[in-house]
Amino acid sequence: MLAKVCSVFTGYSKGDFVSEDGEVIDWCNAAFSVPGTADMLLLKVNQKEVEPDELKPYRANFLLVDFRFDKKYNTYKGYIVKMFPSEAAMNADPLGVPDELRDDRKAPAPVSK
């Protein structure tokens, strides 16, 4: 599930580990406060797409987040896949969802033979 999110970045932690097959895997988790609440949201950072140092501390950050269900923990995990420079840029981004899956855009009618 893709979601556009605006949240206040409060910090991150990152590091690496070696997998069972010897591959070094980098990881990064970023913490956000949910505006108007005392709740926190921890998101994983896709470092192939997003540079964690570009997150603006204690300011609103505009993000595209990929939420996926984790069967092991019976919860959703969120991965930051894109950062936007502004709310306007975030709102203008079409998410890449094909038109035929959207009700708000008319897909071309099938050509009958």
Image (tube, rainbow, N blue to C red):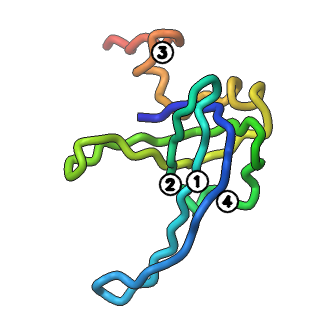
Q: Which mark is residue 7?
A: none
Residue at horizontal 59 percent and vertical 32 percent from the top:
34
Q: CA distance from mark 4 to mark 3?
A: 37 Å
Q: CA distance from mark 1 to mark 4?
A: 8 Å
Residue at horizontal 35 percent and vertical 41 percent from the top:
76
Amino acid at dot 1: Ala
Amino acid at dot 2: Lys
Q: CA distance from mark 3 to mark 1?
A: 38 Å
Q: Secondary structure at mark 4?
A: helix
The earlier-in-sequence mark between 4 and 3 is: 4
| Label 1 CA crowd tier, 10 Å (few <14, some 14–19, many 20+) | some
Check contact, mark 2 vs mark 1: CB within 8 A.
yes
Q: CA distance from mark 2 to mark 1?
A: 6 Å
Which of the two marks, 2 or 1, is nearer to us in this view?
A: 1
Residue at horizontal 68 percent and vertical 38 percent from the top:
8
Check contact, mark 3 vs mark 2: CB within 8 A.
no
Across and down, in percent, residue 66 comes to 46, 42
- Residue with the mark numbered 2: 44
The earlier-in-sequence mark between 2 and 4 is: 2
- Residue with the mark numbered 3: 107
Which of the two marks, 3 or 2, is nearer to us in this view?
A: 2
Check contact, mark 4 vs mark 3: CB within 8 A.
no
Across and down, in percent, residue 93 comes to 66, 30
Which of the two marks, 1 or 4, is nearer to us in this view?
A: 1
- Residue with the mark numbered 1: 30
Q: CA distance from mark 3 to mark 2?
A: 34 Å
Q: Is residue 20 left or right of residue 81?
A: left
| Label 4 CA crowd tier, 10 Å (few <14, some 14–19, many 20+) | some
